[in-house]
Image (cartoon, rainbow, N blue to C red):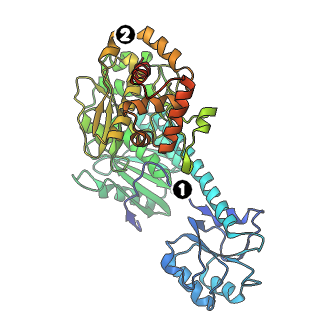
Amino acid sequence: MSSMSAPEPGSAPPAPPVPLAALLARPDLGLRLLSGPEDVPLHWVHTSEMADPCPYLLGGELLMTAGVQLTDPAHYVGRVVEAGAAALAFGVTPVWDTVPPELVAACGRHGLPLVEVPPRTPFTAVARALWRLMAEARLHELRRVTEAQQSLAAAAARPAPVPAVLGALASRLGGRAVLFGVDGTESAAAGREVPVEAARALRDLAGVLGPRPGGPASASGDGGGLRLAAYALGGGDGLTLGVATERRGPGDHTIAGVAVVLLSLLTAPHRGADVTVRDGALVRLLLGVAPAEVAGALGPGPWTVVHARGGDGTPFAAASLAAALGTPLMDAGTGAGAEDATGTGAEGTASAGAEGATDTGAAGATASGPGVPGRARPGTVRLLLPSSTAVTAQQGWTLGASAPVAASELAAGDAQAARALRRAEASRAALVRHRAHGFAALVDRDEAAAYAREVLAPLTGPLTETLRVWLSLHGSWDRTAVALEIHRNTVRQRIARCATLLDRDLDDPDVRMELWFALRAP
């Protein structure tokens, strides 16, 4: 094992670097490689005409220059290499008619890729092309992570969930996944075989974690020509997950974190048969099964749905929160669903505010079908607790809790918890509970729902949710913008659009009261 370090925390993969070859392959740019390899990764792009740009470089850049102050190519290249730049792009004309031969020679000596930028190609075109390639790579990585999460969740619902999760993890990462016992022996493994040296290094890396209180939760290193990573499970009996792969993608740590949470739940000590059945029911529910089909396994309830945002960014934060609240029933998914649906209608497009604000208001129905809880906003953890279990504020987390609901009404509880979380974030409260009593409880539910549909029919999903949040926060533009994570100008435009479509004066308190009751109707 040649090195060891703690993986960087994060719930979402960063933008992957783009190989220089991808830029060179763009015919519209007309770039030409004069020296060095073409497979170096580019993390960003920077333009500088300083004689010594070294103090302003972070490393990994494609540094672009027209050589305005280039007097000593050898010294210049040495400083660029010292700063850690990935490649140098030199634009010819109007300062230089050709790339200086001394610059080509210096880059060749240092192995620094040197790219010629033709006169017809502005530097901004190169920068824009790189950012587009990085955006495409990030989108591809996010899709890969999402598909891997779905695969792991499906594996956890199989009859032999632990081997199935290990197999799914090894398949998604293209390597080997091993579950180590507290004594370092392999409890289970999946994936292709690895060299003896790599297997030994992985076992040693897992041994670094161990069951010591306060010890490291994860570690990474190299061994046998493979990239290695180890993660301590949260079950409390010293189990460790080890992963060996040929390469490590930006989203691999996130995928492994999901597997850690699932394996921690599946291998937790003192798990009774009823808990195992409930875990399987929860996974089925999250995969889109109607609540009525799993109500028998979950129990009749009542249940409390909790939405939470925060934590320390590690893949173990959600499991720690679940343990603190006393429930193994947790969903730490990061995909956007019903509560974060983007408006695509005419009103949603027209309401985009200044500064390129994104229209991210919530739709009123769940994305996974009627009666089925949809996914929460990215970064939101969802938990299911018996209503008899007290929901208390947790340090570092913002919580929204639903009213007690039956297992067949989990979709309604899910929406209540989402709205409560938005109010908690807007008011900077650690915990907000759904309020389900008052005059609204005196009205027949079916009649109220029918009237609400009629009143709110002209509004799209984003407009409906914006109006709901705006009224709940007493007409505050700023707090509504914070709660919906959009620009305050977008809030103003949406509320004005609501007033036009509803043909009502939203400054009238009677109108506000009537709309509020309609928005709260089941």
Residue in view at x 29 percent, y 18 percent = 437
- The type of residue carrying mark 1 is Ala
Q: Does residue 345 sit above or below 105 in this rendering?
A: above
Q: Which residue is mark 2?
A: 443
Residue 46 located left or right of residue 8: right
Residue toward you, 495 or 441: 495
In the rendered structure, find residue 15 and report the number of the disc placed on it: 1
Q: Quadrant of residue 66?
A: bottom right
Rendered location of residue 288, percent (x, y) = 49, 25
Residue in view at x 32 percent, y 17 percent = 299
Q: Earlier in the sequence, mark 2 or mark 1?
A: 1
Residue in view at x 25 percent, y 43 percent = 237
Q: Does residue 76 sit above or below 367 in this rendering?
A: below
CA distance for labels 2 and 1: 51 Å
* Dot 1 alpha-carbon crowd within 10 angstroms: few under 14, some 14 to 19, many 20 or more: many
In the rendered structure, find residue 405 and report the number of the disc placed on it: none
Rendered location of residue 334, percent (x, y) = 46, 41
